[in-house]
Image (cartoon, rainbow, N blue to C red):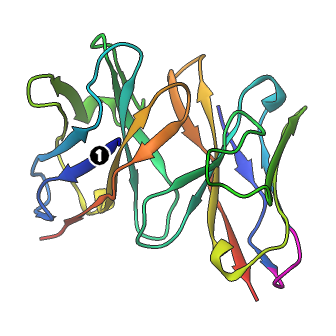
């Protein structure tokens, strides 16, 4: 059974750096799959942030690329997203997801991140 | 690549809800549809234009041609009330998933 679980801080101050971890279960980031990060600000739409492939190819949303770094830790079976210079506009629920082809087959439950002074 | 979606829709139980997703030559792409209920993870209800994952009822159907993709929910029930998002893969610029703005379906 494939599951993903996000973890990280729930509250940040403006300008701080967010580090989120996606723990994978039921699969490993090996041949043919990717893990993506997607967020949803309150009352707004889903927004893709970044993804990493099994071969370490990385993709970023152009509007956020300068603030994002995605990495994978194969032994720990985790994917980590780092977002710098957080602002209140970055408040929202952050999801990680398994991509087997061109859609998100499995989603984590999401983690709410609030940015406030 | 930019996706547009139809406005919110309110539908009586048992009736049909039709949601559209617009994009330039979207018919050349594979469109996926997600149902997202508040406080839950999104869930794919249709993938690759018209296929349903295991466990998704036949009431959910998809079609894609030209500049418009459509998700139809037949025999709507209270459990179908949610936001619905279309998604394609942008192979030209971002090389990643692109989501539509979402359409809220309210069951009266």
Q: Which residue is mark 1?
A: A4
Vertical arrangement, residue A45 with respect to residue B30, above or below: below
Q: Residue at x 16, y 31 (%)?
A: A77
> Residue at coordinates 29% horizontally, 30% vertically from top-left?
A27
SS at circle 1:
strand
Main structural element of the magenta stretch: helix, strand or loop? Answer: loop
Residue A87 seen anywhere in this rendered image of the structure: yes
Q: Considering the image in quadrants, where does the N terminus of chain A appear?
A: top left
Residue B54 coordinates in the image, percent (x, y) = 61, 47
Dot 1, how many residues are within 10 Å of its Cα: few (below 14), some (14-19), or many (20+)? many
Q: Is residue A88 above or below residue A34?
A: below
| A106 displayed left or right of A87 | right
Report the side of A20 relative to B17 (left or right).
left
Image quadrant in which the C terminus of chain A is located: bottom left
Q: Which residues are drawn in magenta?
A: B11-16
Q: Considering depth in this image, is A23 or B95 the residue closer to the camera?
A: A23
Q: How many marks?
A: 1
In this image, A45 relative to A106: left or right?
Answer: right
**B22 on left or right of A18:** right
Q: Position of residue A106 (x, y in %)?
A: 43, 44
Q: From this viewpoint, which residue is outermost toward the bottom?
A: B108
Q: Is residue B9 above or below residue B63?
A: below
Is residue A63 visible in the rendered image? The answer is no
The one nearer the camera, A61 or B16, is: B16
Q: Residue at x 13, y 54 (%)?
A: A8
Point 81% across, 46% down: residue? B62
Q: Position of residue A94 (x, y in %)?
A: 32, 54
| Position in image of residue A2 (x %, y %) | 35, 41
Q: Is residue A69 magenta?
A: no
Chain bearing mark 1: A
């Amino acid at each position: 059974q494939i599951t993903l679980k996000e973890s990280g801080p729930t509250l940040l101050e403006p300008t701080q750096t967010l580090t989120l971890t996606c723990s994978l279960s039921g699969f490993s980031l090996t041949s043919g799959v990717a893990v993506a990060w997607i967020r949803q600000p309150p009352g707004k739409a889903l927004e893709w942030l970044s993804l990493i492939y099994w071969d370490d190819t990385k993709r970023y949303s152009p509007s956020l690329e300068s603030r994002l770094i995605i990495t994978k830790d194969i032994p720990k079976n985790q994917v980590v997203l780092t977002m710098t210079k957080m602002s209140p506009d970055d408040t929202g629920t952050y999801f990680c997801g398994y991509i087997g082809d061109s859609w998100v087959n499995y989603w984590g439950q999401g983690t709410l991140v609030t940015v406030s002074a | 690549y930019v996706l547009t979606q139809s406005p919110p829709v309110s539908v009586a139980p048992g009736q049909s809800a039709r949601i559209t997703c617009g994009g330039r030559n979207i018919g050349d792409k594979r469109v996926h549809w997600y149902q997202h209920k508040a406080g839950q993870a999104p869930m794919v209800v249709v993938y690759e234009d018209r296929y349903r994952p295991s466990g998704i009822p036949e009431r959910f159907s998809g079609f894609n041609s030209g500049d418009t993709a459509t998700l139809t929910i037949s025999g709507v029930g209270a459990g179908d009330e949610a936001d619905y998002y279309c998604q394609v893969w942008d192979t030209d610029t971002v090389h990643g998933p692109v989501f539509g703005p979402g359409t809220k379906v309210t069951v009266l």
